[in-house]
Image (cartoon, rainbow, N blue to C red):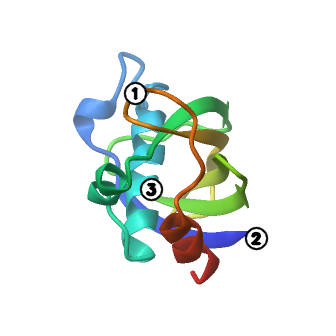
Amino acid sequence: MNRHFSTELVVRSYEMDSFGHVNNAVYLNYLEAARCDCLNQVGLSFNDFARWGAIPVVAEAHLHYKAPAYADDVLIVKTTMAELRRASFVMRFEIEKKDGTRVLSAEMEFLFLTPDGKPTRIPAAFSEAFGRA
């Protein structure tokens, strides 16, 4: 499968912790921004999930911090749609500075649920959009 996407982000001053680098929790926001950008790049949006009655939720997140990022750093989030399963999918992420310094690697698994919280199959339109990306 391995569909690749790229998103550029600029570190903002309010994302810093008391040690002067990006707070660890902020990286989850960066991964979410990259996921949203991936959707846009394949012609989908979060509005589609409500229409389909299938909502992807984070089932697992594994983050490996490699180097700090600082205010005004330009970060490139490289996202890979690694697996599409029956009711879940896996995305892998690499965050690098523009100079190539690796900041973080991560893997997240998402499970599709109905609005009442029951697992459901991945919508065909979602699979098709990433299959033709």
Taking 127 as reference, is 75 above or below it? above
Relative horizontal placement of residue 14, taking residue 79 as reference (left or right): left
Secondary structure of the residue carrying numbered label 1: loop
Which residue appears at 42% of the width and 26% of the height? 23
Quarter of the rendering occupied by the C terminus? bottom right
Residue density around tag 3, few if under 14, some if 14–19, many if 20 or more, within 10 Å: many
- Please provide percent x and percent y for residue 85: 72, 53
> Counting residues from the N terminus, which is met first, the one under dot 3 or under dot 1?
3
Three-letter code, disc 1: Asp
C-alpha separation, residue under disc 2 versus residue under disc 3: 18 Å
Q: How many marks?
A: 3
Relative horizontal placement of residue 38, taking residue 18 as reference (left or right): right
Residue 68, image quadrant:
top right
Judge depth for marks 2 and 1 and give the one in front. Answer: 1
C-alpha separation, residue under disc 3 versus residue under disc 1: 27 Å
Q: Which mark is residue 25?
A: none
- Please provide percent x and percent y for residue 27: 47, 36
Which residue appears at 63% of the width and 40% of the height? 108
Q: Residue under label 1, please give it.
A: 116
Three-letter code, disc 2: Met
Q: Residue under label 2, please give it.
A: 1
Q: Is residue 74 visible?
A: no
Secondary structure of the residue carrying numbered label 2: loop
Taking 78 as reference, is 131 above or below it? below
Q: Residue under label 3, please give it.
A: 34
Asked if the residue under mark 3 is in contact with the one under mark 2, i.e. CB atoms within 8 Å, the reply is no
Comparing 20 with 103, the one in front is: 103
Which residue appears at 60% of the width and 50% of the height? 121
Residue density around tag 2, few if under 14, some if 14–19, many if 20 or more, within 10 Å: few
- Please provide percent x and percent y for residue 89: 65, 50
Three-letter code, disc 3: Ala
